[in-house]
């Protein structure tokens, strides 16, 4: 597992740029974003986690990992759809996971090619795959490619943390839509070029246990 080389530099810059974020960072001195380095597993786990709580996603993923201990495209494609559904996956998520596995198996998705693309090009390439939207692609950028400046505007955890720490517990829904996006972008502008790091620490302010994909 890999920790970003830029992490300490980003922490220092964010502490100087934003006192509120600096207090959050100070409460988590020994944790950092870590990449498992497995592109397929990162995307598969992101699909599993779509539209369910972190706790529920962890439970489903744990059952899936027991069912398929070697989490590779080839191994997953050998599992029957009914077996995958028994892990707690919806029928649609089973379809998405199998389609993702086929993209890797065929070579249509290639990690080496993705690492050479800029962030928006990676998002465009990944969202061609069924079941992968912008949020899932952004999780891949953050957790697998370790890109430093991703701001996932559709992530409810990030919006909740911003609402809590910067807007006096204003309803999270106020940050959805065009006006909300513009507000978040403006608020997050001091965090650039380390918005992935800022997002990670804001997640920690809600849940001290680091999420890994």
Image (spheres, rainbow, N blue to C red):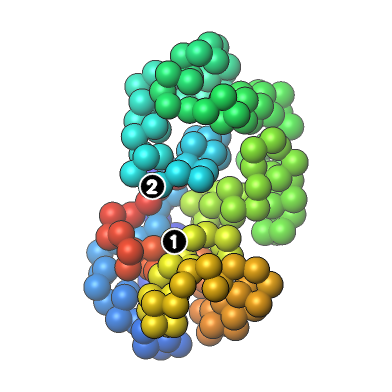
Q: Residue at x 64, y 38 (%)?
A: 131
Quarter in which the N terminus is drawn: top left
- Asked whether 153 or 141 is in front, the reply is 153
According to the image, label 1 marks what residue?
Answer: 157
Gap between marks 2 and 1 measured at Cα: 10 Å
Quadrant for residue 33, please give it.
bottom left
Circle 2 SS class: helix
Q: Is residue 110 above or below residue 138?
A: above
Q: Is residue 38 visible?
A: no
According to the image, label 2 marks what residue?
Answer: 54
Q: Which mark is drawn over residue 108? A: none
Query: Residue 29, image x and y in percent?
Result: 26, 69
Callout 2–callout 1 Cβ contact below 8 Å: yes
Q: Is residue 1 visible?
A: yes
- Asked whether 207 or 8 is in front, the reply is 207
Query: Residue 190, image x and y in percent?
Result: 53, 84
**Number of numbered labels in the structure image:** 2
Is residue 41 toward the left or the right of residue 99 in the image? left
Q: Residue at x 56, y 72 (%)?
A: 175
Q: Residue at x 60, y 75 (%)?
A: 180
Quarter in which the C terminus is drawn: top left
Is residue 152 toward the left or the right of residue 34 in the image? right
């Amino acid at each position: 597992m890999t920790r970003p080389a830029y992490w300490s530099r980003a922490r220092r810059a964010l502490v100087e740029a934003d006192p509120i974020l600096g207090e959050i960072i100070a409460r988590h001195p020994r944790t950092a974003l870590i990449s498992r380095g497995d592109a397929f597993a990162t995307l598969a786990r992101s699909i599993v986690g779509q539209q369910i709580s972190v706790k529920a996603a962890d439970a489903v993923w744990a059952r899936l990992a027991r069912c398929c201990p070697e989490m590779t495209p080839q191994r997953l494609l050998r599992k029957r759809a009914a077996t995958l559904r028994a892990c707690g996956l919806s029928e649609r998520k089973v379809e998405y996971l199998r389609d993702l596995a086929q993209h890797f198996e065929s070579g249509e998705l290639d990690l080496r090619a993705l690492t050479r693309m800029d962030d928006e090009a990676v998002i465009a390439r990944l969202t061609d795959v069924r079941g992968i939207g912008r949020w899932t692609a952004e999780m891949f950028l953050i957790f697998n490619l370790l890109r430093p400046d991703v701001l996932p505007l559709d992530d409810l955890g990030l919006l909740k943390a911003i609402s809590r720490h910067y807007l006096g517990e204003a309803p999270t829904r106020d940050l959805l839509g065009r006006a909300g996006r513009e507000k978040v972008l403006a608020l997050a502008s001091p965090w650039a070029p380390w918005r992935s790091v800022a997002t990670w620490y804001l997640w920690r302010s809600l849940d001290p246990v680091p999420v890994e994909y």
